[in-house]
Amino acid sequence: MRNAPDHSLAAVLRIRDFRNLWIGLGLSSLGDWMGLLALTAMANASAESYAGKNYAIATVLFLRVLPALVMGPIAGYVADKLDRRRTLIWGDYLRGALFVTIPIVGQLWWIFVVTVLVEAVSLVWGPAKDATVPNLVPRHRLEAANQISLATTYGSALPAAAVFAGLTLVDKFYRHVFDGFIGGPVDLALYFNAVSFIVSGFVITRLKHIPSGPASVDPESSALKVVLDGWKYVATTPVVRGLVIGIVGAFAAGGVVIGLARTFVSDLGGGDSGYGVLFGTVFAGLGLGMWRGPRLLQGLSRRRLFGIALTLTGLLLFPLALVQQLPVVVGITAVLGFFAGVGWITGNTMLGLEVPDEVRGRTFAFVGSMIRLALALVLAVSPLLAGLIGTHTLGPLDEFGHPYLVYNGAAFTFLIAAVLMTAVGVASYRQMVDRNGPSLMTELRHSFTGSAGVYSATGCFVAFEGGEGAGKSTQSQRLREWLEADGYDVVLTREPGATEVGAKLRTIVLDPATGDISPRTEALLYAADKAEHVDRVVAPALARGAVVVTDRYVDSTLAYQGAGRALVDREVERIARWATDDLRPNLTVLLDLPPQQGLTRFVERDRIEAESVDFHERVRDGFVHLAGNAPEHYLVVDARRPVDEIAEEIRHRLRPLLDHAVRRADA
């Protein structure tokens, strides 16, 4: 559907295989959260002292991340070597069977064993699932797919917490309701968890198009070499490295909150029900942030949004630690979860877009391993620290002999996590944001006035942009020849002048005889050409599934009339987007060339080419800023490189985007 924007959740859910994967994921996530709540509540009840309760809960949570310390580095290798469909199905069946045994055996040591075994299976299952999603949906719908997947994973904690809190309340007031279960509502929650995994595996059996592990994994390569290659890729790729630092730091700070949440709620006068409410609230905010956050600030670049979200999450930990009223803490937790969700969906989407398929499983496994390692460390240290700090009273006693304020070790530890989380957010922001890009205020203005755009559900739309003499015509022609040789229906077009009306407008705007005209008049003339171009050429071709290759599109208007003529960016973009019905290219190739070099590639100059070098420098900066705002939709190439090298890089980037383009019947 052409009118379905790239963030449309309905459009993603119409993809059958992704829909089935989503249903299975939702079922298993719901049960898993109930299991976590049940086990931590059981651990809390097993100890009496303040420090003992912290240590008991920490043991359960630590065991959930312990396998990552042992087999985490090779989990991605295994995920990339195994058939992903079988891994997802049998991974769910195995986890379900293991959870069934916990109430049957009924021993604490067996709970610990099952926790380790389940997490070992999940270490392979998780990367297989994460690496599969980008293969099930078009590239421009990956963020929406990740929003659905992650919002389901974490948002399912809300109904799980509600059910668990309800079961504990029922057990509190009606003691004999759960007499059929030795462990009461805890056993019931564990059975529900087991059944949800088994049903999830059955649902995933309906997926028929999950690709196997990448064939590019050399069967002769050792596991050590493959793992080291994956780590090397992360370490030498700046964006991925920055994402890993931010994500791991965020989860480390989050681990402090998770590990101390139960005792923190007790410090504030809440019991199991209060714990369930707080637990559900943070994940409700997390799910809402994943679902709505990127759309609320859709004009903000993902790199900038990622750093800002992490920083705000850290800052919100300060009032969470300082406020001692449970209702206020619940409200702050919801907002904190929202920004954490924005950061997680943004970072996860960037990883899916930046990492090639042949190393995607290993990269996601590496990220998962580092997350679990960080969690293991903080889950071991934070309860110990909270226990060592203990309980402190502040201020004089009141008339009843009660202290003015009681401040416990959990709250003190939260303050430490707040400092660390804020530092990670600031460091991530500084590392990932392009210093030469648009200012934060500029992007914020665009985020409230811009649009995420519309991407055609059929065909493929490619735009070539760049300054004068950058080689756009040469490369667009070469791309057309390559695509036609491969059997695709290709339409090569240009702006301005691709239509009868456009040809007349081209004469007006480019003929030196036209002389000086108002910049606003010029912008409107280009907009008229674009409207005719999209309605008469581009949209009909995409509707039949063709690959449309255009020499210039909206970015040229934004760069030439916006940056070059110094018109207000927001107004120029509004006109251009309206003229094109906000249709965006699936890929924009920016051929970047210094104006001093490009302007020497021709003798006769039209009205625009005859502008000053300063004008063309501003235009070049405008193109670079546009590409920096949405790097997932751009390929920036140094136009000084050999023509053949440029053509090959364009083909490599375009191949994954051709899924919805059709080949000719005679191909």
Image (tube, helix red, strand yellow):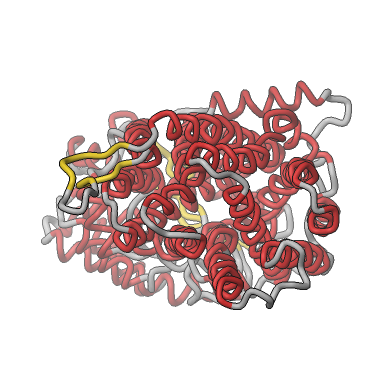
Closest to the observer: 435 or 120? 120
Q: Residue furthest right?
A: 220
**Side of 325 relative to 337 (left or right):** left
Residue 112: percent from the left, percent from the top? Answer: 74, 42
Residue at x-position 38% and y-position 73%: 581
**Side of 108 relative to 155 (left or right):** right
Q: Is residue 265 above or below residue 75?
A: below
Which quadrant holds residue 496? bottom left
Residue at x-position 57% and y-position 39%: 58
Residue 111: percent from the left, percent from the top? Answer: 75, 47
Closest to the observer: 628 or 635? 628
Closest to the observer: 380 or 55? 55
Q: Is residue 464 visible?
A: yes
Q: Is residue 84 above or below residue 526?
A: above
Residue 593: percent from the left, percent from the top? Answer: 37, 34
Q: Is residue 433 visible?
A: no
Closest to the observer: 69 or 288? 69
**Side of 486 relative to 373 (left or right):** right
Q: Is residue 621 above or below residue 212?
A: above
